[in-house]
Amino acid sequence: MPELVLAIDTTTDVTVGVARGREVLANGRVTDRMAHVEQLMPLVHRTLAAAGVRLADVERVVVGLGPGPFTGLRVGIVTAQVLAHVRRVDLHGVCSLDVIALDHARSGTASAFVVATDARRKEVYWARYGADGTRLGGPEVSSPDAVPRLPTVGPGADVYPDRLQTVAGPRVLDAGLLAAYGLDLPSAGTEPLYLRRPDAAESAKRKSVLRILPGQDIRR
């Protein structure tokens, strides 16, 4: 019997998929991007229940590694790491953009294309793909104006429709597809693909706590 695969991705939405071999048994999504911690494990249990299986039945875990925002991405990856460790099964990490590319390529696209997601700060995460969904470049983070002028799908296509060559195609990552085909996608390790430093970073410079009075000269 084909392996039972649990897939998790929190690059944008909170998404969970369950598949046995190529058969997608269930998938779930929570679109509240500010509640990854609270929503992920309940969604895992609901999706497994919808598939008619238990966590104890899971034989492989696949996780999307981004690129994506620091906090949400970390929640999904750490959860996948813990579940794989508890179940004592292999964890397979993939570039999340590859999943959207696979979805688009399966629709029969006839040319190279780009997958883009919103990176905030007026930038996008993106990668370039061949017509068959093979990644040819990236992932990278840049201004939309620096993205190759190729047909573009993914959630970033709707954020910057005037600056990207937007075409019809998938706009979200399908966690069911990730569960069914994720093991065939290139391994990207098991660490997050951040591509840039997190927004909240510890300052390397000490702040002065001295009170400087008017007219007082402080020499260093």
Image: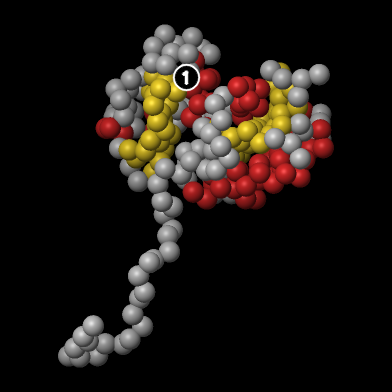
Label 1: few (<14), some or many (≥20) within 10 Å? some
102 vs 81: above or below:
above
Report the side of 57 relative to 196 (left or right): right
**Count the marks: how many?**
1
Label 1 amino acid? Thr
The residue beneath circle 1 is 134
Q: Residue at x 45, y 27 (%)?
A: 154
Residue 182 position in % (x across, y down):
61, 26
Using the image as rendered, state which of residue 43 and residue 128 is in the foreground.
Answer: 128
Instruction: Mark yes or no: residue 71 visible.
Output: yes
Q: Residue at x 55, y 43 (%)?
A: 191
Q: Quadrant of residue 114?
A: top left
**Quadrant into which the C terminus falls:** bottom left
53 vs 170: above or below:
below
Report the side of 148 relative to 48 (left or right): left
Residue 53 position in % (x across, y down):
81, 31
Q: Residue at x 76, y 31 (%)?
A: 59
Using the image as rendered, state which of residue 199 and residue 170 is in the foreground.
Answer: 199
Q: Secondary structure at mark 1?
A: loop
Residue 194 position in % (x across, y down):
46, 44
Q: Residue at x 32, y 38 (%)?
A: 142
Q: Quadrant of residue 152?
A: top left
Instruction: Mark yes or no: residue 64 visible.
Output: no
Residue 96 position in % (x across, y down):
52, 32
**Quadrant into which the N terminus falls:** top right
Report the side of 217 relative to 127 (left or right): left
Report the side of 62 relative to 137 (left or right): right
Q: Name the image colouring.
A: secondary structure
